[in-house]
Amino acid sequence: MIFRQLFDAVSSTYTYILGCEASREAVVIDSVFEQHGRDTALLRELNLKVKYSLDTHVHADHVTGAWRLKEAFNAPIVLSGEYHAQGVDIEATDGMVLSFGNYALTVRTTPGHTNGCLTYVTSDKAMAFTGDCLMIRGAGRTDFQSGDVHTMWHSIREKIFSLPDACLIYPGHDYLGRTVSTVAEEKRYNPRIGGDAREEDFVGYMQNLGLPHPKLLEIALPANLKCGEPGEDFVQGQVSWGPVTVTFAGIPELEPDWVARHLQDLYVLDVRSKPEYVGELGHIDGATLIPLDELRARIKEINTDKPIVTVCQSGKRSAMATQILLAAGFDRVANIPGGLIHWSRLALPALVGGLS
């Protein structure tokens, strides 16, 4: 199984991507609205299509990206029906199975943090995605949003601690950089509910946390009760000057055939050395040469009247050039992936010089 654990530093939220190698179907658990570009870039690079967008619960500390995933992949949104949220396609119930290719997740209802919290468990019971119910050496707060500490006690003890000891626990958040635990570890070491803890011990601990309410509570809850669908004034973050895609590494790119068709509208920046510029591969007609090593010192020479497209031999140095330009405040920048090697392989026009 393809598995990725992603992190949003602002809300300390983990997003999980699980995919099938054979079918390329995937599920995304607990996406974050602002991380949609990152997530879709990775899904694109891994050649995965989202079959379901899953949330473990209605979050209070960030806005879900479920609506954006549905827009991008036509992926049904899965959430507990306890919230009566708008836009839910599948109301998850205890025991429901959600398949993706050769794999599946089984829903376990684990209320307590909220009345609709869910845990998703792989069919082999090797992995459990517990949201804000059981966390690494902790548990989700129960003092608002229909939370109930007694309900959470039973959810953890009966629905999560009943899993095999070796089952990996993947929480919705962690604030100390911890990424994964096991059922056995939490049974033994969790200071709130592990070891010889009884229900009254857990209740006493949880009722005295003294935590402030999440900073985004007033924004996140209303938005998440609509599965993250924004208002009418929301504009998707698409580039208007060309079909730019951003890689998982954060590099904006334009396909070379599109560049070749629009050369008159672009400022092509070649960042190779002078010998390479007139060497074997030649250069794109009209391209400006500024070697990468000189780019920061000569950045004021760049014409900003047109969008900037960077190029080099293989697309690696020019990828670095896009990062230098973006950091310097240039906003219309993209790299040609594969560089002039790929350009030549495609037999695209406008190459001058070079060796025959």
Image (cartoon, rainbow, N blue to C red):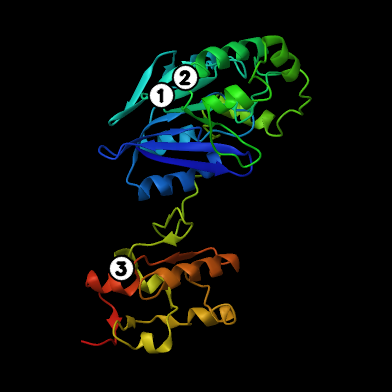
Residue topped by disc 1: 125
Q: Residue at x 79, y 25 (%)?
A: 210
For residue 348, say whether it is visible. no
The mark that comes first in sequence, 2 or 1, is 1
* Side of 345 relative to 81 (left or right): left
* Residue 229, horizontal then vertical, whole percent: 51, 32
Crowd tier of the residue under label 3, counting other residues whose Cα lies within 10 Å: few below 14, some 14–19, many 20 or above: few
Judging from the image, what secondary structure is the residue with disc 2 in?
Answer: loop
* Residue 195, horizontal then vertical, whole percent: 64, 19
Q: CA distance from mark 2 to mark 3?
A: 58 Å
Q: Residue at x 43, y 55 (%)?
A: 247
Crowd tier of the residue under label 1, counting other residues whose Cα lies within 10 Å: few below 14, some 14–19, many 20 or above: some
Tag 2: residue type?
Answer: Leu
- Closest to the camera, between mark 2 and mark 3, is 2
Position of 299 relative to 202 (above/below): below
Q: Quadrant of residue 77?
A: top left
For residue 113, say whether it is visible. yes
The mark that comes first in sequence, 2 or 3, is 2
* Residue 294, horizontal then vertical, whole percent: 54, 82
Looking at the figure, which quarter contains the C terminus?
A: bottom left
* Residue 114, horizontal then vertical, whole percent: 61, 18
The mark that comes first in sequence, 1 or 3, is 1
Residue topped by disc 3: 261
> Do residues under tags 2 and 1 come within 8 Å of each other at their CB atoms?
yes
Q: Quadrant of residue 252?
A: bottom left
Q: CA distance from mark 1 to mark 3?
A: 52 Å
Residue topped by disc 2: 163
Crowd tier of the residue under label 2, counting other residues whose Cα lies within 10 Å: few below 14, some 14–19, many 20 or above: some
